[in-house]
Amino acid sequence: MTHVKTALIVGGGIGGMSAAITLRNLGIQVTLIDLDPQWRVYGAGITITGPTLRAFKALGILSEVITHAYTGSGIQVCDVNGKPLHVVPTPVIADEDVPGSGGIMRPFLHQLLSKRTLQLGADVRLGITVNTITHADDAVEVVFSDGSSGRYDLLVGADGVFSRIRDLLFPTAPKPVYTGQCVWRIVAPRPPMIDRRHFFLGGPCKAGLTPVSKDQMYMFLLETTPKRGILSDNELVTELRRLMEIYGGILSDIRNSLGPASQIVLRPLEGFLLPRPWQKGRCILIGDAAHPTTPQLASGAGLAVEDALVLAAELAKSSTLEEALAGFMSRRYERCRLVVENSLEIGRREQMRAPIDAQTNLVEHSLQALAQPI
Ligand SMILES: Cc1cc2nc3c(=O)[nH]c(=O)nc-3n(C[C@H](O)[C@H](O)[C@H](O)COP(=O)(O)OP(=O)(O)OC[C@H]3O[C@@H](n4cnc5c(N)ncnc54)[C@H](O)[C@@H]3O)c2cc1C
């Protein structure tokens, strides 16, 4: 592979750091920039699927995830009082020794990926973004927000759902759209009985629990509502308590534990699929910059890591960058479309309070499809 020697990755989130790792593994000289001078990540948990664990394995971080985060199998579906109804199986991935599902704290995943990114020698520059992109025949030329500039063989836009690189490359592209749901999340101590993912269905909201470590889990609650603005800490506690009023069992324990010290994270859900192509000249979009998904299939992080793996695989086997980016698109579009569209559809079913089976069947079928090789 001689056609790409230098790459600029814009965005040091899950996708950008994964790309830094896979491109450094090919010997490409990588510069990674992030707008956040502290390169922080907010402290919520995320759910990971079998395919995400397969991608972690390919990236070289699976054993640390298994040791320090949480892995299990299946999703226990319960009613609003915590009465078990049935288990949605999580498919076993053929020829891969990976668990069916799991959970991890975002800061821990960030720590694993950033450590590996730095160890592999990526040049990480923080507190800057890209002001302009100029497409030359033999390079992409970039002017950064601090006035410096650079020339690269490849630019990877991994700057998330509100991507600036997407706006620069495709100014008329669709923008993320609010889906009608906000998600509330909080980390809580994990009792031993919560040993796998749980959904609590049949109420006005969809609620769930995911273990993220030996002694921690996170709760999510999807509320159907006009888009919410920023709430004060007191308002967050009062509103979440109100939304959780009808729940019994373990969710009522979590509700009763809410107080001024609770770290509640509230986010509106936005999603859309960028129409093909995601590449222009020597630039390509990956992760949420191209396919920001709502979390119903818990696959956004996994897709971002897979993008990085497939990009490197295509670069390694192609004789031109154009061929590699075309190969990337043909392998990624349908899989990402499935996640974005099915997640939006599950969200619609949640909002119209469709029967429990109608919600969980689509989760099950989608997880089976995602277990196929990438
Ligand atoms: C509420 C919620 C819950 C979710 N739950 C799950 C889950 O359970 N499981 C799962 O798999 N996925 C989940 N996701 C999706 C997952 O978080 C994303 O798909 C994943 O983070 C995408 O990674 P990314 O690297 O593309 O973007 P991000 O992780 O958003 O990273 C983007 C990076 O780019 C940087 N940046 C932004 N703008 C610029 C700029 N102009 N210049 C330079 N840098 C910039 C940011 O600082 C950030 O570091 C959830 C998403 C949401 C919103």
Image (cartoon, rainbow, N blue to C red):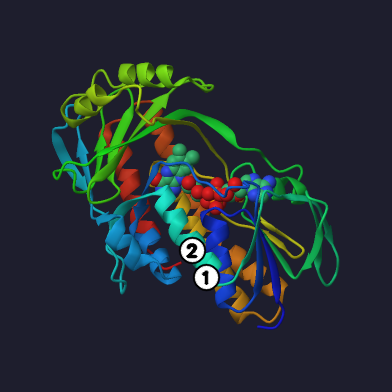
Tell me: residue 138, above or below residue 38: below
Q: Is residue 219 left or right of residue 149?
A: left
Can you give x and y, in whole percent of width and height, for residue 295 in the image? 43, 42
The circle on residue 119 is 1
Distance of label 1 from label 2 (alpha carbons)? 6 Å
Q: Residue at x 19, y 27 (%)?
A: 253
Question: Neighbour class for label 2 at 10 Å: few (<14), some, many (≥20)?
Answer: few
Q: Position of residue 314 (x, y in %)?
A: 59, 74
Q: Is residue 329 left or right of residue 204?
A: right
CA neighbours of label 1 inside 10 A, class few (<14), some (14 to 19), many (20+): few
Residue 151 marker = none
Q: Is mark 1 within 8 Å of ligand 1?
A: no
Q: Secondary structure at mark 2?
A: helix
Q: Quadrant of residue 23?
A: bottom right
Q: Is residue 150 left or right of residue 197?
A: right
Return the x and y of residue 61 as percentages of the image width and height.
40, 66
Residue 207 percent location from the top left of the image: 30, 32
- Mark 2 sits on what residue? 115
Q: Is residue 80 above or below residue 52?
A: above
In this orientation, does residue 127 appear?
Answer: yes
Q: Tell me where residue 125 sits by quadrant.
A: bottom right
Nearer-the-camera pick, 127 or 290: 127
Q: Are marks 1 and 2 in contact (CB under 8 Å)?
A: yes
Residue at position x 42%, y 17% from top?
235
- Image quadrant containing the N terminus: bottom right
Amino acid type indicated by mark 1? Gln
Amino acid type of the residue tagged 2 in the rendering: Lys
- In this view, the residue in front, 46 or 37, is 37
Pick the residue in front: 314 or 219.
219
Q: Which residue shows up at 57% across the image and 50% down it?
A: 39
Residue in view at x 37 percent, y 34 percent: 185
